Image (cartoon, rainbow, N blue to C red):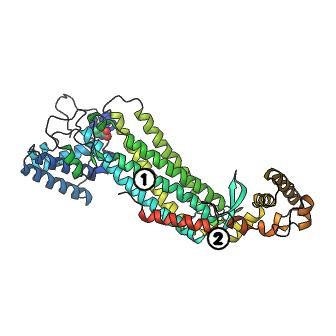
Amino acid sequence: MKLWGGRFTKETNQLVHNFNASISYDQRFYRQDIEGSIAHVTMLAQQGIITSEDRFAIVNALREILDGIENKTLVISDEYEDIHSFVEATLIEKIGDAGKRLHTGRSRNDQVALDMRLYTRDEVRHTDELLKSLLEVILRIMEENTGTYMPGFTHLQKAQPITAAHHFGAYFEMFKRDRQRLSDIYKRMNYCPLGAGALAGTTYPLDRDYTAELLHFEGATLNSMDSVSDRDYLIEFLSALATIMMHLSRFSEEIIIWNSNEYRFVELDDAYSTGSSIMPQKKNPDIAELVRGKTGRVYGALLSLLTTMKGLPLAYNKDMQEDKELTFDAIDTTKGCIALFTGMIDTMKFNPQVMETSAKNGFTNATDAADYLVNHGVTFRDAHGIVGQLVLHCIEKGIALDDMPLEEFQAVSPVFKEDVYNAISLKTCVEKRLTKGAPSKKAMAEAIKACREYLDGSGIE
Ligand code: ARG
């Protein structure tokens, strides 16, 4: 059953129908399609374009169709081209001529623009909620680990000591920005395209602002051609999802390294690990690896849609139908990854002893030894050279700076005194870093407080 048979004299070729049809995937927004239609006829009746009897019949029948789909008594048939055709045909079958008035002053171009926007708007919100749960877990881990020392890395080489709280705090900031991006996108996309018609509006006296209000939009879009051909909000959303995945992927990479036999900083819970079919000893971080791996397909969706859109003349072109499968896949993938990742880190255990030993063994206090000299009048550049020599000496002896006898310190620079041991202890190295955003307990307490305040007050709308 088609919406557009009139000017055709032949049946559509079956392969053409299959190639053209979108119902296998756009049935996902049946609810949004029906809600949009209910708002549309409510507005049509208010404007006197249809009678209130027709509105009543249409709204009731649309609600029955919605219930039918939801309780599975009504099956969405793939004989139809898309979800819009299915809903309209089912409506006409139920109530006859009144149903034929539903599409007055509307095109599938503004209809699909509306449906996709409504669907995406909900998904932006869901994604934000999942990120909020992830941030709750990250914050709990931060609160519990302000004294869990570990090496901080640059170039994946031990650099300076930090704490697990500080390291997780970095990810808190990343996912916080991701949420801010989502809420910006939400605000920008929250305008209703319905009433744009095929491209040039309509001669019926529609009240577009009323339709927008019924569907909880901020207002109606301003240009009818842009309304049916704008997919910027999807590109922005895909870009935000790609950035979330990039953050999850970096975090996953670190967890894979920390969980490795060499590092043993963390241990993943059995429920979030998998085994090997041949090697009985294995416990693999597959979830983290899959999150890292799936990042590629979300990037792919973003690039696909950018490419699909780049050559399209105004206004609607069928190419735009391609926005759906890849956006749906990117949404499902990202949401799934956030949820699994949250469970994985929520159940993960730290090995604080191993982490601390690792921080002690990598000369992560070399900067602090140089700072000690600077505090005793040596220039930083000279201090850097002196400590460099000391490190070389320690490497030859196979010991840490802290384990070197005072005479050996003094042989390189007489400035060193007994108090150097305290000055370069792991605890001092971390706790003296008091600048805003640094890892000391004191600075972290401030950061944690700010994170808590942010989290309690955050959310879309
Ligand atoms: N399935 C179509 C899409 O997703 C719906 C709009 C169809 N419009 C049209 N003029 N053929 O873009």
In terms of depth relative to the viewer, which is nearer, 430 or 41?
Answer: 430
Rendering quadrant holding ligand 1: top left
Residue 218 lies left or right of residue 290; in this view the side is left
In this rendering, the answer to whether 47 lies above or below 173 is above
Instruction: Tell me, for residue 147, which label it has, or none.
Output: 2
Residue at (40% x, 49% y) in the render = 184
> Looking at this view, is 243 or 14 the one in front?
243
N-terminal of the pair, mark 2 or mark 1, is: 2
Dot 1: few (<14), some (14–19), or many (≥20) neighbours within 10 Å?
A: some
Q: Is residue 394 above or below residue 427?
A: above
Q: Is residue 135 visible?
A: yes
Q: Name the kind of residue labelled 1 in the image.
A: Asp
In this image, 417 relative to 235: left or right? right
Q: How many marks?
A: 2
Label 2 vs label 1: CA separation? 37 Å
Mark 2 is surrounded, within 10 Å at the Cα level, by few (under 14), some (14 to 19) or many (20 or more) other residues, namely many
Local secondary structure at mark 2: loop
Instruction: Tell me residue 458's x, y (percent).
Output: 42, 61
Say which quadrant the C terminus sits in: bottom left
Q: Which residue is mark 1?
A: 332
Q: Nearer the viewer, residue 77 or 284?
A: 284
Taking the spot 81% from the left edge, 53% from the top edge, the residue there is 379
Whole-percent x, y for residue 176 in the image: 49, 56
**Left or right for 241, reference 123:** right
Q: Amino acid at mark 2?
A: Gly
Task: Tell me if I can see residue 264 in this picture.
Answer: no
Residue at image position (30%, 42%) is: 113
Name the one closer to the observer, 251 or 97.
251
The vertical placement of 117 against 315, above or below, is below
Q: Tell me where residue 194 appears, x and y as whole percent.
A: 24, 43
Q: Residue at x 24, y 34 (%)?
A: 198
